[in-house]
Structures are given as C-alpha cells and as structure tokens.
Image (cartoon, grey):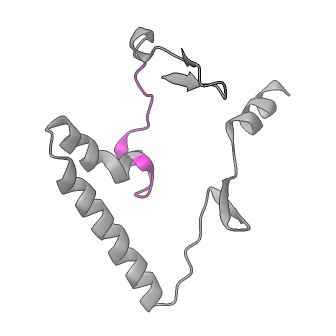
Amino acid sequence: MYAKYSTGENVVFIDTKKLPIIKKKLRKLEDQNEYETHCLWKGVTLNLKIRDIGASLHRLEERQRAEAQERKGKEIQWETRLFHEDGECKVYDEPLLKRLGAAKH
C-alpha cells in the first residue's frame, strides 16, 4: 500500500507481503446469528476459493433484495443492532477507539 502526499510523492505506507498471516478467531457458525458477517459471506468465501465469485455474490444480493421487499410489503422498519443514524450516515456504535478506551479503565 502506498501513501500519496499532497506534494505528489508516493511512499510505501505498508508492505503487506512482509506482514505475518494471522488467522481470524471466529465463533463456530452454529453459534452465530444468521446476519453476522461470517454466516452471510460463507458462500462468497467458498466461491472465491473455487474462483466462482459472481455466483454467490448474486445469491447473497438476491436474498437481501427479497428480504427488503418482504419487509416493505409488511411495512416493517429495518432496525440495526450495531449502527445508529447520524443525519444521512450510519455510525458504528462500538468503534475500536471506544473499545480500546473501555479496556484501559
């Protein structure tokens, strides 16, 4: 990754090839909510491994559209659990800096 300064100078920001590979620590799929990232994207990850990206992305997007249409038909408001609205933006409720600050106390 490179950083480009306002002067136009490009410098190496971080060399990802020199970073160690750190495996993610995840809860088991059966212990996760169906809308948690790992559950939602498991098909995409599998298809990335077999180089069939479009298929699972398409299925995930279609599922999300169908669920949104169903909520709209039933006039159900989508409620987020981890974000709140701030004007036109959605803000994560537990940002890293907040969590790090809580860990210090």
Q: Which residues are magenta?
A: 22-37
Residue at (39, 82) in percent of width and height: 69
- The image shows residue 85 at horizontal and vertical percentages of 69, 65
Q: Image check: 67 left or right of 89?
A: left
How far across and how far down the image is residue 101, in percent?
80, 31
Q: Is residue 34 magenta?
A: yes
Q: Residue at x 27, y 55 (%)?
A: 57
How many labels were placed on the picture? 0
**Residue 88 falls in image quadrant:** bottom right
- The x and y percentages for residue 24 are 43, 27
In the rendered image, which quarter is residue 50 located in? top left
Q: Position of residue 1 (x, y in %)?
A: 48, 23
What is the residue that sits farthest to the front in this orientation?
Answer: 7
| Secondary structure predominantly adopted by residues drawn in magenta | loop
Residue 76 counted in the magenta span: no
Quadrant of the snapshot with the C terminus = top right
Q: Is residue 70 above or below residue 99?
A: below
Q: Is residue 64 above or below residue 41?
A: below
